[in-house]
Amino acid sequence: MFNPLVDNFESLSDDQVDEKIRKLTSHYYQTINPSVRNQIVTLLEMYQVEASVRRQTRYQQRDGDDDLDNLINVS
């Protein structure tokens, strides 16, 4: 999925990505034009994938901080 109208996601905060998803979802339901809906779906999927990747990255970083090795005493 690539759309030349979408800038780099790195410049957007997590809240901005979520806001774009909300706006695109709203626009999707406001139009009945199938061509416009297809374009919105493409953009929506791009933003949803970006949001998912960010959540997964945060989860992995948080999960890496929980060091359970020190809790198990093997002697």
Image (cartoon, rainbow, N blue to C red):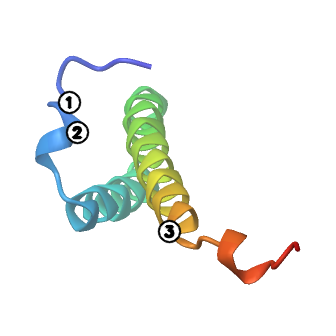
Q: Which residue is at a point 22% across and 39% down the rendered structure image? A: 9
Q: In the figure, residue 25 lies in which quadrant?
A: bottom left
Q: Residues within 10 Å of mark 1 (few under 14, many from 20)?
A: few
Q: Nearer the viewer, residue 48 or 31?
A: 48
Drawn side of residue 53 relative to residue 17, left or right? right
**Residue 32, which numbered label?**
none
- Which amino acid does the dot numbered 3 rest on? Asp
Label 2 to label 3: alpha-carbon separation:
26 Å
For badge 2, the amino acid type reads Phe
**Label 2: element kind:** helix
Q: Nearer the viewer, mark 3 or mark 1?
A: 3
Residue 7: give x, y in percent of width and height: 14, 31
Name the residue rendered at 80%, 78% in the picture: 72
Q: Return the mark for residue 6.
A: 1
Q: Residue lying farthest right? A: 75
Nearer the camera: disc 2 or disc 1: 2
Query: Left or right: 24 with respect to 34?
Result: left
- Which residue matches tag 2? 9
Q: What residue does disc 3 label?
A: 65
Direction front: furthest residue: 75
- Residue type at tag 1: Val
Please give the name of the residue rendered at 44% of the width and 37% of the height, measured from the top-left corner.
Answer: 37
Badge 3 marks a residue whose secondary structure is helix
Question: Residues at badges 2 and 3 in contact (C-beta under 8 Å)?
Answer: no
Is residue 73 found left or right of 27 in the rendered image? right
